[in-house]
């Protein structure tokens, strides 16, 4: 025997289902906050995402949920996570975000890792009105983007600022007669290296330094010995490399092997990684690099300990964007709690205007960007301290000249 | 000049080492192994794990990792690839099938490595000290890798040209059907060659891990490099592999030292193109009619 639904009862059934679904959605919004993210679990971005972003997302969710969740009004609701792999691919990242928004109906979205992917997801997050706390993007267009997408927050600042701060530090060191005026600069022929070197080139010459060597190398170069050998022959006072993690390690290794020990030795992304200290040990002493943090601040020490306890194999955070990423999550939480309900427009407003208490200190954004960054750090006694801008609280004095390499 | 040439030879030796296994797998077993780079990274991880966890030197690790890779690759050929070999009506079809199958294998291996080791970069220091060689300062680990490459290449060359089994392998590379007619067990020879290729890439992975930073997703770089060297040298030719690898390494190093490090990739590809234009079958390859 078969039964047939009349059109009316079918409609009724559909309406009931819809009503129940609607009710369920309302009920759910009250019992948890759905936070989604698409992150590079595979592909070329994996190395960066695995060190800087993923452990912080996991640490934050774990801690917030252990404390009962995010406070909405007078009660706490736990975070529920929906996550995807963006495969280090811009189209995939945008697709995943659209899925998070339309299918999973998440309340908030955490950003992907890296400048490229953050730029790629910017328009979508802006169109859909989600706050976009870009914690791992360095771009000169940040001020312009913050205007165009008022929901976007550029936590790492601009490459021009990075280059300018480095050159200011060098000028000061020259004034103190600690270094001469010959600079050798190499850069990776990819986003970061191109941006940083084209910002540094005019700044270096404007500060009347002699740029003795200025060349780039393609991404994936497997032997940097020819570069180091040529630079060593020029005997510069300052060596600057705007490099990615594998080349940062290779350049340092090669310099040590070739006995190239300039007064200032500065390398790019990866210098602030725990891997760098793990590989070079005592030889990190005096090495400068991009980033840094207030290594002596109790908040950072506490964050470091919690990160180690939470991450797989007790991994440490990197000493630059990790703490900034974690701080951006704290800001998001504080903004949501101050608003007291899931109101994304109000949360964006609060992020723009509020003051936040974070592991990197008090943060107050101006034009959607922080006012304080660490641009140059230096390994001193096993910790990567911020040394420039010197006016930053907790800035250490640079060790110059860099001590000689020692046998490992 | 000596320094640039020495650096180039060491880099070229590494390229040749990376490509040697692929030239066997592709040239003889006719498997276009797209997961080749992943096998290299897997061996690098194994070496890293042995060194940091158990303080076993990578050179001792070779004795452990290489036989294991041989057995593993033999099993992969027998279980995964033999059905493809049986089904394929001709060698071209087998090539296409093997591309698809090993492409899938790429994700399996990469996924397992991501699950085991995470996506972060790995690097460790072994023999990372300067040594004087021909009046120049070079890294001991790179020099050691070059030495082992030359040794492996020599042993392999002699094995292929001076032994009965080697002759059989070369016969299969030239014409598997004719080889069958002279009582060569082609499936067996193919399986062993594929496994030998796997053992070689494992050796390359262990050596490379002593001086390069790697992560679970960096395999594809090595597959690409190996492919260029193999095609340039002539598919299935050991000597061609060595010459092509050294030529690439030398040109890279000379251009980086005397012209501009930014042009190394361009020179690599220009050299590759030039060889293909003059000798479409590769430096030592034989044109098929």
Image (cartoon, coloured by chain):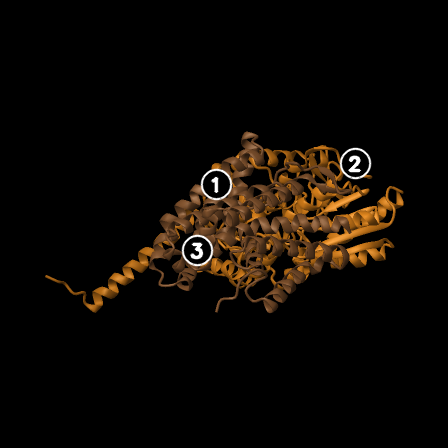
Chain colours: A orange, B brown
The reply to the same-chain question for discs 3 and 1 is: yes
Q: Nearer the viewer, mark 2 or mark 3?
A: 3
Q: Which residue is identified by label 1? A: B116
What's the chain of the residue with tag 2? Answer: A
In this view, the residue in front, A295 or B169, is B169
**Residue B127 % position (x, y):** 66, 36
Q: Is residue B134 left or right of residue A83?
A: right
Q: Nearer the viewer, mark 3 or mark 1?
A: 3
In this view, the residue in front, B244 or B252, is B244
- The secondary structure type at the circle numbered 3 is helix
Instruction: Name the mark on residue A404.
Output: 2
Residue A194 in the image: above or below residue A378:
below
Residue B252, picture quadrant:
bottom right
Q: Is residue B224 visible?
A: yes
**Residue B138 % position (x, y):** 72, 42
- The residue drawn where x is 38% and y is 63% is B90
């Amino acid at each position: 025997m078969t039964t047939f639904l009349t059109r009316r009862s079918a409609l009724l059934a559909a309406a009931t289902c819809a009503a129940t679904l609607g009710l369920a959605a309302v009920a759910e919004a009250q019992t948890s906050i759905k936070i989604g993210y698409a992150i590079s679990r595979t592909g070329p971005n994996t190395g960066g995402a695995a060190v800087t972003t993923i452990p912080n997302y996991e640490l934050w969710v774990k801690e917030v949920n252990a404390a009962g969740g995010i406070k909405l009004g007078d009660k706490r609701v736990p975070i529920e996570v929906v996550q995807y792999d963006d495969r280090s691919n811009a189209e995939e990242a945008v697709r995943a975000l659209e899925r998070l928004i339309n299918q999973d109906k998440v309340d908030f979205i955490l950003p992907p890792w890296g400048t490229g992917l953050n730029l790629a997801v910017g328009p979508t997050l802006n169109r859909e009105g989600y706050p976009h706390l870009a914690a791992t993007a360095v771009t000169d267009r940040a001020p312009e983007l913050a205007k165009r997408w008022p929901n976007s927050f550029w936590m790492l600042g601009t490459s021009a600022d990075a280059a300018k701060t480095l050159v200011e530090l060098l000028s000061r060191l020259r004034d103190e007669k600690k270094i001469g005026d010959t600079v050798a600069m190499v850069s990776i022929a990819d986003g970061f290296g191109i941006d940083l070197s084209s910002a540094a080139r005019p700044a270096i010459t404007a500060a009347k330094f002699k740029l003795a060597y200025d060349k780039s190398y393609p991404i994936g170069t497997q032997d940097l010995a020819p570069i180091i050998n040529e630079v060593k022959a020029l005997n510069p006072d300052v060596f600057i490399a705007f490099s990615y993690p594998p080349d940062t390690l290779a350049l340092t290794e090669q310099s040590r092997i070739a006995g190239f020990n300039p007064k200032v030795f500065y390398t790019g992304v990866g210098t602030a990684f725990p891997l760098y200290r793990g590989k070079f040990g005592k030889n990190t002493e005096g090495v400068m690099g991009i980033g840094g943090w207030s290594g002596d601040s109790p908040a950072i020490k506490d964050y470091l300990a919690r990160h180690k306890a939470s991450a797989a194999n007790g991994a440490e955070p990197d000493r630059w964007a990790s703490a900034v990423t974690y701080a951006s999550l704290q800001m998001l939480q504080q903004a949501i709690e101050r608003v007291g309900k899931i109101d994304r427009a109000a949360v964006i407003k609060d992020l723009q205007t509020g003051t936040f208490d974070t592991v990197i200190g008090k943060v107050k954004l101006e034009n959607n960007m922080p006012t304080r960054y660490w641009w140059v750090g230096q390994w001193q006694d096993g910790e990567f301290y911020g040394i420039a801008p010197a006016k930053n609280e907790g800035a250490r004095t640079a060790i110059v000249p860099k001590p000689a390499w020692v046998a490992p | 000049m000596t320094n640039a040439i020495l650096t180039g030879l060491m880099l070229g030796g590494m390229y040749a080492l990376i490509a040697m296994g692929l030239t066997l797998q592709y040239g003889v077993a006719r498997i276009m192994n797209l997961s080749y780079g992943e096998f290299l990274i897997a061996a690098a991880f194994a070496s890293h794990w042995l060194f940091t966890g158990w303080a076993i030197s990578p050179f001792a690790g070779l004795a452990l990792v290489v036989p294991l890779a041989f057995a593993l690759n033999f099993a992969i050929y027998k279980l995964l690839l033999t059905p493809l070999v049986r089904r394929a009506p001709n060698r071209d079809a087998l090539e296409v099938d093997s591309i698809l199958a090993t492409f899938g294998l790429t994700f399996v291996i990469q996924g397992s490595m991501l699950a085991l080791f995470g996506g972060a970069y790995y690097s460790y220091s072994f023999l990372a000290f300067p040594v004087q060689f021909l009046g120049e300062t070079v890294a001991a680990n790179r020099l050691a890798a070059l030495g082992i490459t030359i040794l492996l290449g020599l042993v392999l060359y002699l094995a292929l040209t001076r032994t009965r089994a080697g002759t059989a392998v070369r016969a299969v590379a030239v014409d598997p059907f004719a080889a069958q007619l002279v009582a060569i067990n082609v499936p067996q020879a193919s399986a062993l060659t594929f496994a030998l290729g796997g053992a070689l890439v494992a050796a390359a992975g262990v050596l490379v891990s002593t001086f390069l930073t790697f992560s679970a997703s960096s395999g594809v770089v090595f597959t690409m490099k190996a492919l260029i060297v193999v095609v340039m040298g002539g598919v299935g030719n050991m000597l061609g592999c060595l010459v092509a690898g050294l030529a690439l390494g030398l040109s890279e190093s000379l251009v980086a030292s005397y012209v501009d490090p930014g042009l190394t990739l361009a020179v690599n590809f220009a050299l590759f193109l030039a060889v293909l234009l003059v000798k479409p079958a590769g430096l030592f390859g034989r044109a098929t009619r």
